[in-house]
């Protein structure tokens, strides 16, 4: 199977199970038009995040890594009327595009976007006693995965679900001799989850429009 086949199956999934969504299509188009990198989650992955948040009964969500807000919107739509998602983004330009996308999607009132280095924003959330969050999605710079997971633990409660994206890296995660910083970050995520006694987790390999990758998912005990 080639990447073209994987992408075709993704298209089949979306065509078979999803209703047309011009708003989300416009969000992706806006991201492209403003020069954002095409590293958003796929529509199938976005729907998965939405379903996981709904299964969790989440009212408070934390997202580390906003980009143009595509995944944020999927999760914000899963929240109840009084729900809230706090999303963290480093890049001012990305944040500007994301805010416009939130307005386009009608979810601005449910989204709090904080701009700056994520570790500083997380420290501020800790100082503010902003937790606990019910659902946490980590999709930012991979070398900081263990630091993000550490903060996720501090801002969680027993039962919080944590999802960490891009942990397979085209299968390079098994290459112990590799020195790619993103692969090392993926391996660090596995090490953290595997050694943290308060986490019960697994990982899923995925193929699709985004190629060969996967995510780790864990529950705080």
Image: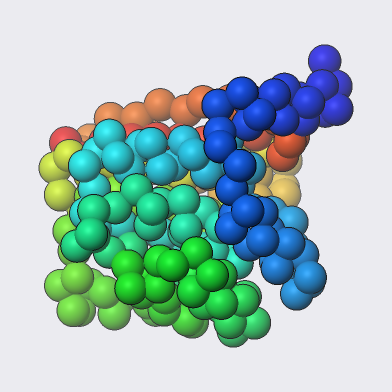
What number of labels is visible? 0
- The colour style of the image is rainbow
Q: Horizontally, is 133 left or right of 53 in the view?
A: left
Q: Horizontally, is 167 left or right of 156 in the view?
A: right
Task: Report the residue at 23% width, 53% height from top.
Answer: 80
Provide residue 88's location: percent of width, then percent of height.
Answer: 44, 70
Task: Report the residue at 63% width, 53% height from top.
Answer: 22
Provide residue 182's location: percent of width, then percent of height.
Answer: 65, 51
Task: Report the residue at 41% width, 79% height from top.
Answer: 114
* In the foreground, 59 or 80: 80
| Residue 100 visible from this viewpoint | yes
Above-or-below relation of 53 to 176: below
Provide residue 89's location: percent of width, then percent of height.
Answer: 51, 73
Above-or-below relation of 10 to 28: above
Q: Quadrant of residue 127?
A: bottom left
* In the foreground, 48 or 17: 17
Q: Split into 4 quadrants, where in the image is the C terminus?
A: top left
Q: Quadrant of residue 200?
A: top left
* In the foreground, 137 or 99: 99
Q: Quadrant of residue 90?
A: bottom right
Q: Horizontally, is 176 left or right of 143 in the view?
A: right
| Residue 181 visible from this viewpoint | no
Above-or-below relation of 142 to 7: below
Task: Report the residue at 82% width, 15% height from top.
Answer: 1
Provide residue 70's location: percent of width, then percent of height.
Answer: 56, 57
Above-or-below relation of 68 to 136: below
């Amino acid at each position: 199977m080639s990447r073209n086949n994987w992408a075709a199956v993704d298209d089949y999934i979306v065509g078979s199970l999803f209703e047309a969504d011009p708003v989300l299509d416009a969000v992706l188009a806006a991201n492209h038009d403003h020069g954002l990198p095409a590293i958003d989650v796929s529509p199938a992955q976005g729907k998965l995040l939405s379903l996981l948040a709904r299964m969790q009964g989440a009212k408070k969500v934390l997202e580390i890594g906003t980009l143009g807000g595509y995944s944020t919107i999927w999760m914000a739509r899963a929240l109840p009327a009084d729900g809230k998602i706090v999303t963290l983004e480093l890049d001012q330009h990305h944040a500007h595009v994301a805010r416009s996308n939130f307005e386009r999607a009608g979810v601005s009132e449910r989204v709090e976007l904080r701009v700056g280095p994520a570790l500083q924003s997380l420290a501020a959330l800790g100082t503010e006693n902003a937790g606990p969050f019910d659902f946490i999605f980590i999709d930012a710079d991979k070398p900081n995965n263990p630091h993000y997971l550490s903060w996720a633990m501090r801002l969680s409660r027993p039962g919080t679900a944590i999802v960490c994206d891009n942990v397979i890296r085209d299968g390079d995660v098994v290459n112990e001799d590799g020195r790619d910083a993103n692969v090392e970050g993926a391996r660090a995520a596995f090490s953290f989850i595997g050694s943290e006694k308060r986490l019960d987790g697994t990982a899923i390999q995925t193929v699709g429009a985004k190629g060969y990758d996967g995510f780790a998912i864990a529950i705080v005990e």
